[in-house]
Image: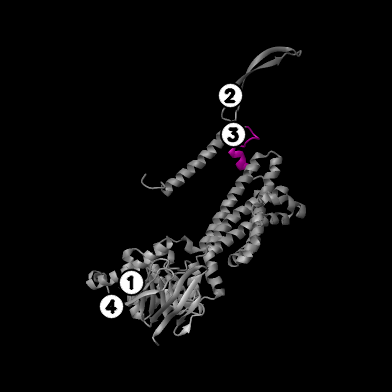
Amino acid sequence: MRRFPPTIPKSSRLLYGAIGIAIFFAVWWILTAPMFTEVETRRVAIDGPTGEVESYKEVRHEVSRAIVNPPGLETPGNTFRRAFEIGLPQHILASTLRILIGFLISVSLAVPLGIAMGLFPRLRALVSPIVSLMRPLPSIAWVPLFAIWFGVDETQKLAVIFVGSFAAALIYTVEATLKVDPDLIRAATNLGAGRRQLLTRVLLPAALPNILSGLKVVLAICWTCVISAEIVGGQFGLGTLIWTKKELSDTAAVLVGMASISVVVLVMDAAFTLAERRLVPWMFLRRGAS
Amino acid sequence: MSDVVLAARGVTQRFGELVALEGLDLEVARGGFVVVVGASGCGKSTMLNLFAGFDQPTEGHVTLLGEPVAGIEPRCGMVFQNYALFPWLTVRGNIAFGPRLRGGASDERVSELIRTVGIEGFDDHYPAQLSGGMKQRVALARTLANDPEVLLCDEPFAALDAMTRQVMQEELSRLAAATGKTVVFITHSIDEALLLSDRIVVMTARPGRIKTSLENPLPRPRSAKQQLTPEYLALKREIWESVQEEVLAHIAADA
């Protein structure tokens, strides 16, 4: 092997990726396509005028055989059409807004507290046990409690997003703060920086890249939270959509809901990466580039 | 005595059980280039931290221009082995960091420093885009921007490849001569010490003290060619024997 790990050019990567996706849809299509038709011959009785069987007739009859029958799986075409019939934009908008608001509340509290915990070991020791207890709880475990407290309104959903993401955001921020190169602090101190200047001109920019990559993970966690929170109902939301359509055995709508969640998460992730490139451009540089 | 810029008198530094320095005495004359060599773990860096005011000695005192160093001392500018450049700032931003803390840096002054250390044309590059040698030039310029009394260099060229190191050694010699700065320079390399120093100080194994201090009579400007002269080799042997004893002592103490 010439190089390890072995790699291929980007154009080939894209080509193979496209082939992979094509195979996925092809398999889906084959599984649901009525292509395995059989010709059955049935004997049909022909009644005479008095009601008794007068004669028989052979009838040739085509029967389609999908490997997986609806409602087990919908065809790609039906699923695609269903996407335009179920008010998808409203559901996407509802979930996305919840996530953005919940994420911002969580982050605006977790980041300052996390930085403070990084700087003050006593505060860190004080808060860490509570966070350790909160962190292992999956977001769905909070859903019943908040359903009792808040019902099925927006508060309930934001609360689930908040508790589901706060501990992670906090831990990522603390780690990012502790990971700041001590020599940068020493260098800045040596150059005459006071405590306040150390915080604003060194610690924050030094910790920012790691805080951001942590928050990117937190944003994805927020999605699992909102889908859990929307199980209990409400009018709109992708979680509500897939759970209500499940009750109606509307496979196509459930699939559309799932695909939407996936696409919206990918889009948000890409948007976050763009924001990162603007906020911490120096992390995307390589030697020799300018 | 008036030309003593930096002095350590009877300095002992303990970290719990560990005695890093014990009864260290050192005087650094104005404009002098003192190179400190010693076995690893002999407290060289501990000494530099005391000079910069990062730590306070357990006993004894450190003085700068006759006054005790009581806290962080920006007049003793540090140059670090791993450069410690601010990755989010450009070359200009890094160099202007110190002056900006005190209200402002003139663009001309920054440009002048960029020329001084020979990194013209890289003003708007980020550290990630620079080679090790270039980074250390920026770090030197950043320290010089504060116009310190003393340059404290903590093995600044140890991470560079041999060729770059040699270029940087010559550059630093030139800079020190041109600016008249007092330099305290720590290294493992006896060749580096002989190339750079006015005076070479050998430290003992832990707890660190000054073992030998000798003037370096080699004529300047110095170059690699001198490394084959009998005078150079005799000096090198003298220092090597002095250091070797301490390295052996250090190994014995660790065993």
Using the image, determine if residue A32 lies above or below residue B238.
Answer: above
Q: CA distance from mark 3 to mark 1?
A: 79 Å
Mark found first going from the N terminus, 2 or 3:
3
Mark 2–mark 4 Cα distance, whole angstroms, equals 104 Å
If you read the primary sequence from the N terminus, does the residue marked by circle 4 or circle 1 appear first?
Answer: 1
* x, y percent for residue A99: 64, 56
Q: Nearer the viewer, residue A37 or B43?
A: B43
Which residue is labeled 2 in the image?
A38
> What amino acid type is highlighted by mark number 2?
Glu
C-alpha separation, residue under disc 3 versus residue under disc 4: 91 Å
Q: Disc 3 designates what residue?
A: A32
Q: Amino acid at mark 3?
A: Thr
Whether A161 is drawn above or below A109: the answer is: above
Instruction: Name the residue beneath numbered marker 1.
Output: B193
Q: Height in image: B129 above or below B102?
A: above
Residue assigned mark 4: B217
Question: Comparing marks 3 and 1, which lies closer to the viewer?
Answer: 1
Q: How many badges with numbers are in the image?
A: 4
Looking at the picture, does residue A109 appear above or below residue A28? below
Who's the residue at 50% across and 74% down the image? Answer: B55
The magenta span reads A69-81
Instruction: Report whether mark 2 lies on the same chain as mark 1.
Output: no
The nearer-to-camera label among 2 and 1 is 1
Circle 4: is it few (<14), some (14-19), or many (20+) Cα within 10 Å? few
